[in-house]
Amino acid sequence: MSKSSIFSGLRSNVFAGFVVSLIAMPLALGLAIASGFPPIAGIIASVVGGVMVAVLGGSYVTITGPGNGLVVVLLGAVTVLGEGDMQAGYLYALAAVILSGVLLLLFGFLRFGSLSDFFPATAIQGMLSAIGITILLKQLYVMFGDLETKGAALELLLGVPTLIQTLFTDGSTGQWYAAGIGVVSLLIMVFYSKIRNRFFHLVPAPMWVVLLALGFDAYFSFVGGGNPISKSLLISLPENLLGGVPTPNFSKLNQPAFWGVVVSITLISSIESLLSIKAVDKLDPQKRRSNTNKDMKALGLATIVSGFLGGMNVVTVIARSSVNVNNQASNRSANFFHAAFLFVMVLVFQDQLRRIPLTSLAAILVYTGYKLAAPAIFVRMYQIGKEQLLVFLTTLISTLLTDLITGILIGLLTTFVVHVLLNKAFWLFSRNLLKPNVLMYKESETQNYYVGVIHFCTFLNFYKLKSKLDKIPQVERAVVDFSLCSFVDHTVQESLQSYEELFERKGGALEIIGLDIHETDSSHPFAVRTLRPMKKFRVFGGGRTKRQIQLEALAQEKGWVYTEVAKSQKQLLRDHPVYQTASVERVYNLIEGPKKRLSLFDIHYSEGAFIAKENIQTTLLRVQLDREIPVFSFDRELLLEKLSHLAGIHDIDFPEYPVFSRNFYVQGNNPQKVRAFFDAKMVSFFSAYGFYHIMSNGKELLVRQFLRPATPAEAAAMIEFGLALKEKIDG
C-alpha cells in the first residue's frame, strides 16, 4: 500500500477502524473460546490479519480476523487431535492452521481466486446454516453457564430441556448470575436494531454486551462482596500477553486425520473469505473490484504468522467489513487501524477483559449462529424452488451428521443429480457440461458486446461465462443471450445479478435475454430455468423474467397491451411467405398498439430438418399500413447478400443514390415500383435506420434487428422506429 493511499481519507479510516475494533474485540475473544483456543488467539488473528492484509492484500475495504465458519472445524480439530487433552489439541491445531496458511498462499499463486465459483450457492448456504446451528447449540450451553457438556449438534439439541432443568434445580448463585447476563446480552443483540435512538447506536451491540458485563462487575465491587461469578466462567488471559509464544506441534504430519483437518480449515477459510470479498465489493462506494488472488496470498501469509504466534486462521469477514464500509472507510488503512486499536485496547484494558463472563460472549455467538440459520433462509430457499430447498436441506443435514467436507461434497453431488433429473438426459447433460459453451463478439450495429451461451450453464461451467464478462469494460453495454441454452441454474443467475449491479455502478449496462420461454417452478427471479418440463418439481405459471417485467412496463407506459403468450400465433405472420415455411414454436411477449396496427413480439421458430434444423429466437415488429406499397426486402449490404449475387439473386440498384445502393441490399419482384417507392425522403430515412432488416408484403412490414431477442431498450427503439416509419409511409 503506497504512502499516498495510507493518508488519503485518514480521518474517516481512523474512525472506521476504531468502530470496527469495538465490535471485533468481543467477537475475537468469543470465537477463540468457542473454537477451543485461548481467548488471546482471536486477538492475535485480528491484529496480525489487520496489519498484514492491509499492507499486502488486494481488497480495499475488507476487515480480516477470525471467522464464524471456522469455529466448528477448529473445535473439532482441538478435540480430535488432542484426544481429550485440550492443551495438546490446541498445539496440534496450531500446526494445522499454519499448513492451511501455506495452502492458501499456494492457492493465491495458482490463481485459485475463482474457487468459490465452482460451488453451488445453495449448497454453500446449507453448509453455512449447518455451521450456524452448531455454533448456536454449542454456545447456548455456555450462555447458561455450562462449560462441561459436549457432543454433536443433535445430542446438544435433545439435551436443551435437561440444561434448563439442571439450571433451575442444581444451579449455583454464580451460575444464575452468569446465565442472567447471558440472557440479557442475547436480548441486547436481538433488539439492538429495533431501538430507535441514534445515541444508543453510537455504540455497537457487542460493545453494549461488554459494557453490561463490566457494569455488573463494577456494581458488586462498589457494594462489596466481589463478583459472584466464579473465575471459571470469566475470560482467562495470560499474565504477560507479550510473552510465552506457544510452540505448534507438527508430530502428527503422518496421520490422515491431521491432513483432513488441514484440508477442512483451508476449504472453509477460502470459501468464507472469497464469498465475503465478493459481497464487500458490492458495498464499496468507489465500485472497485478486489484482486482475490492477491488477497489469498496475504491471508495465507497472515495465517502462517498468526499460527506461529498462537493465533487462529485469518479470514475476510463480512459483518465487520460492512460496518467498516458504513463508517466511510475508503481504503485498506481502516483494516490496519482496526488492528492497532484492538492491540492497544487489549494491552491497556486486559484487567477489565478478565472480568467479562464467558456467558456474555457466548450470547453474541448464539445470535451469530441464529443469523446464519434463521427461518427466513429456509423460506427463501423454498421460494427460489423446491429443488433448491432439497439441495439446501440435504447439505445442511449431511453437514450436521458428518463433517464440513463431506457435507459440501454431498451438497455438490445432490445439486448435480437434481440438474440431471430436471434435464431428463444424463448423457446429454454430462456430454455438454464442460464443453466450450460461450461465444462473445462486438455487434457492429450497436457496438454492444454480445455473449451467447449454448447447451447448459451451471455452477460447474459458469467460469467460462465469467471469464468472458470479466474481459468487457464495465462502462460498456453487454447482452447475455440464453436463447440457445437449455438449462440455467440458480447459482448462475444469482452471480449474473452481481454483474448487472457492477456494470450499472460503473456506468455501463448488462442485460440478460433469452430466458422468457424457459420454464420455472417458482416465481423467484433466480429460479432454475429449463426448456424441458420439470415434472418432478414443476408448477406451471412460473415467474416472469426481468426482461418481461420491463416489456410490460414499456407497454403500460405507451398505453398499449402486453400479452405474455400470444394465442393467435399464426395470424401475425399469415401473409408473410418467408415465415409460412418455417415451423413456429411460439409467439410470446406480444405488445400491441391501438387497433393492433403496430405489434411487437418475440418469436421462436425453426427452419430446416434433421441435422440441418436451425432454431431461431428473435424479436419482430409488425407494422400494418394504410396504403399499398411494393413488395421488397431491405437490409445492409453484408457478405451474405454479396454471396447471393453469385447465386443469381441481384439487388436493386439506385443510380441516383450510389451511396445508398452500395451500402444496402434491396430486393423486390418489381424493381420499377421499388425504385419509385425509395424516393429521396425514403432513402434518407432508411439510411438513418440502416441497422434494421425490413420485409414488405405490400400491406404490412416486418422489422427485425438481430437474430436474437431484443433487449427492452432495443424493443422501445424498434417501436419508435415503427411509428416513425408508418407515419412516413402513410403520411
Image (cartoon, rainbow, N blue to C red):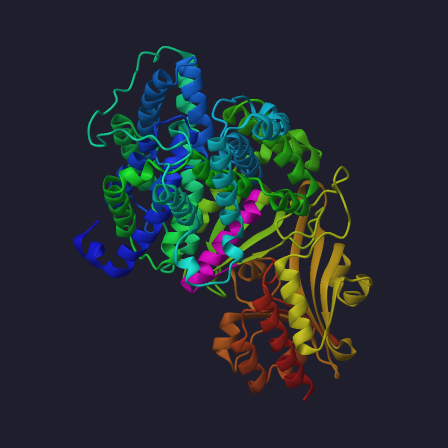
* Relative to 321, 438 lies left or right: right
Percent coordinates x, y for residue 652 in the rendering: 59, 73
- Seen as rendered, the residue at the extreme bottom is 731
Name which quarter of the figure residue 604 lies in: bottom right
In depth, the one of 384 and 151 nearer the eye is 151
* 30 relative position to 311: left or right: right
Give the vertical position of 171 relative to 360 (above or below). Answer: above
Instruction: Locate residue 568, reporting x and y percent.
Output: 82, 63
In reply to whether residue 644 is colored magenta, the answer given is no
Q: Quadrant of the C terminus?
A: bottom right
* Residue 632 visible in the picture: no
Residue occupying the far front of the picture: 224
Q: Is 234 situated above or below 538?
A: above
Q: Give the total number of marks visible in the rendering.
A: 0
- The percent position of residue 133, horizontal first and vertical second, equals 56, 34
Report x, y in % for residue 550: 63, 65
Specify whether 619 is left or right of 275.
right
The residue depicted at 31 percent of the width and 35 percent of the height is 45
Q: Tell which of 503 and 86 is nearer to you.
A: 86
Tell which of 407 and 95 is nearer to you.
95
Q: For the magenta stretch, what is the residue range?
A: 491-510
What's the magenta bit mostly, secondary-structure-wise?
helix
* Residue 492: quadrant of the picture: top right
Residue appearing at x 25%, y 42% in the figure: 343
- Point 32% across, 31% down: residue: 41
Q: Is residue 648 above or below residue 452?
A: below
Q: Can residue 493 be found in the magenta stretch? A: yes
